[in-house]
Amino acid sequence: MDHERCVACGFDGSEFDDPGLLDGLRSLGPTWRTLLGSAGDELRDRPAPATWSAIEYAAHSRDVTALHVWGVEQALAGGEPVIPDVAGDDLIESAAATYSEADPADVVDALEDQADRLADVAHHAGSGTWARGITIGRSRSDVRRLLEHALHDSRHHLDDVERGLAVLRGTGR
């Protein structure tokens, strides 16, 4: 099995057993809620012109988590669905145009709902089904990898937000 790994943030999907992976997903909402609650006046400030603000990263993580719910549901429906490649940059830029004005409570509520839904769908299907997959473009991902990627993406951006807030507050990291 090919696990999600990231040198930049140290994420390693192989470190999570199945229940731990689902627990990690369920922890995303409360973790984002705490971090955004601590952002204060810096919630919408970018630490650098090309670096998103805390609310922008949270809204992105909400959308990525929702996308993973869809992918897992499609994979678990059976038949190994094949979806045409998505033009990601245009899609991301279009969605990101509204991130900075988002209501933080709404963003975290939706992110938490999606992360819980993702964990619930995977849990109810049972880890024995997690080898099922979906192919987007030329890239196939199984359910386990989608779950790992959803957790990694959000945790990676939580770290981005913490670093950005430290820069904004002059405490650096």
Image: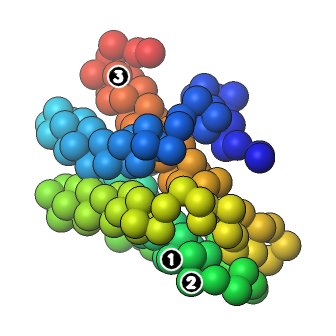
Q: Nearer the viewer, mark 1 or mark 2?
A: 2
What is the CA distance from the residue labelled 2 to the residue labelled 3? Answer: 43 Å
Q: Percent position (x, y) of residue 21?
A: 47, 43
Horizontally, residue 137 falls left or right of residue 6, namely right
Residue 110 found in image quarter: bottom left
Sequence-first disc among 1 and 3: 1
Q: Percent position (x, y) of residue 169?
A: 28, 22
Q: Which residue is depicted at the point 49% across and 61% down?
A: 126
Q: Residues within 10 Å of mark 2 (few under 14, many from 20)?
A: some
Q: Which residue is depicted at the point 26% across and 64% down?
A: 113
Badge 1 vs badge 2, beta-carbon distance below 8 Å: yes
Q: Which mark is residue 166?
A: 3
Q: Is residue 41 above or below residue 63?
A: above
Q: Nearer the viewer, mark 2 or mark 3?
A: 2
- Report the amino acid beneath label 3: Ala
Residue 84 showing in the rendered view: yes
Q: Out of 156 and 4, give the one closest to the viewer.
A: 4
Q: Secondary structure at mark 2?
A: loop
Which residue bears the numbered disc 1?
Answer: 73
Which residue bears the numbered disc 2?
Answer: 77
Horizontally, residue 128 falls left or right of residue 164, namely right
- Report the amino acid beneath label 2: Ala
